[in-house]
Amino acid sequence: MRVFLSLARLLPRPLRASTSCARRSRYSRTQDLGGPLRSASTGNDYRYDDVRDLEIRVPDRFNFAQDVLDAHAAEEATRDGLALHHVAEGGSGSEEETRWTYAQLSDLSRRAASALRKMGDIRRAVIVLPKVPEWWLLNAAALRTGTVLLPGTTLLSSSDLSARLEASGADAVIADAATTEKVDVALKGKKKALEGRVRHKILVGEGEKAEAQNGWVRFGDLMDGAEPIGDRQTDSSEVVQIFFTSGTTGAPKMVPHTQASYGYCHQLTGRYWLDLTPGDVHWNISDTGWAKSAWSNVFAPWSQGACVFVHGMARFAPSEVLRVLGDYPVTTLCAPPTLYRSLVQEEDLSSRRFPKLRHCVSAGEPLNQEVIASWEAQTGHRIKEGYGQTETTLITANFKGEEKKNQRVVLSTV
């Protein structure tokens, strides 16, 4: 059976702009803690046999920010639901939190798109940021302006950045304070031609370069007074992000993804593998520089109207991960196999309580059955594995149903 899916419930609707969002946003110099907590979800209701051979038809015209995010912002069912719940790094009870509803995200991302336009026509931008709210905001904004983002991890060296800037033809860099130093070294290195081509340098956040030295412009300053940008018609084939492969064989290579491959087709990832609904709070433990972050931190959860949960911890220590699962209303968890192994081997899971958690998935490498069995025995949740590559979306995965056989569903998208 072939099941043709659609985003019919997310077709474009008149946007109802939220004027209160701008006044209460972090860029109005006040911290936004508004928005209700999401209620517990039971996931999607489908039969295993109905999703064994999935195929979707992509529309010719599609823009994820307008056709999905703005639609959620306009719909009563999702408008006031959380789109992002960000917790800054800190000890228990001392974390600074940012919460944006879909209405607020729609408004803020339109303003962020306007802020990018202040810099001129940015064609391609290398973006290197830690897990800060601006990373999510700029992902949404770039979809509106047509700026192609090239995400990178904060572990990149100056030589890495130089190679990426040269290979990609990027004309802009968006970075945190720590990365600006490496960017400046890269631009003043052997490839001096980069200095003339990289015309825009945007600093996100505070730090040693808060005064925006060496031509850097602070993103917060660009946001001041920015008015929401209007809609822009886009083909679904328009490239929106380019990721570099890990360089397993040879130098890292560029992989482009489009409004269709990421924006439209990740609805399969969100609905069937992550099993997300508007009632879910999804925590994907991934660095912002990898494609998995785009998968499970942006397109898949937002396609389903779920809340993306982010914790800014620099290093995911097992005990801290378990504390967060117990303290926050996380309903679905996506973590790499190495973390699941550490949790099982280093912690007593049977003594922990995760009141909202209901669904767990893993990707990145095969997870051994002993860890899967131990996690299930101690938490009651079976880990659903998924597989894909930087060059693809989700290729094969364990879905709900047929629990004992642990069967995998192979996805096909056209």
Image (tube, rainbow, N blue to C red):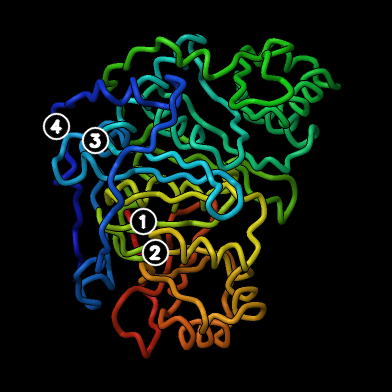
Q: Which amino acid does label 4 sit on?
A: Arg
Measured from the top left, where is residue 282 in percent x and y? 40, 57
Q: Mark 2, mark 3: which one is toward the viewer?
A: 2
Q: What residue type is labelled 1?
A: Val
Q: Position of residue 209 (x, y in %)?
A: 71, 20
Q: Nearer the viewer, residue 222 or 123?
A: 222
Q: Which of marks 2 and 3 is nearer the N terminus?
A: 3
Q: What is the number of the mark on residue 67? A: 3
Q: Name the residue under label 4.
A: 13
Q: Which residue is drawn at 72% across and 12% down?
A: 213
Residue type for callout 2: Thr
In the image, residue 288 lies at what x, y percent?
57, 44
Which residue is denoted by mark 2 in the rendering? 332
4 or 3: tag closer to the N-terminus: 4
- Which residue shows up at 53% across the image and 52% down it? 93
Discs 3/1, front = 1
Instruction: Tell me if mark 4 has few (under 14), some (14-19) or many (20+) residues whose alpha carbon lies within 10 angstroms of its own.
Output: some
Q: Nearer the viewer, mark 4 or mark 2?
A: 2
State which mark lies toward you, 4 or 1. Answer: 1
Determine the residue positioned at 37% across, 51% down.
300
Residue bearing mark 1: 281
Residue 154 picture quarter: top right
Sequence order check: which comes first, mark 4 or mark 2?
4
Q: Is residue 278 above or below residue 410?
A: above
Q: Which residue lies furthest to the front in this view?
A: 93
Marks 4/2: CA–CA distance: 29 Å
Q: In this view, does 126 lie above or below 247?
A: above
Q: Considering only order in the chain, which callout, 1 or 4, is on the residue closer to the N terminus?
A: 4
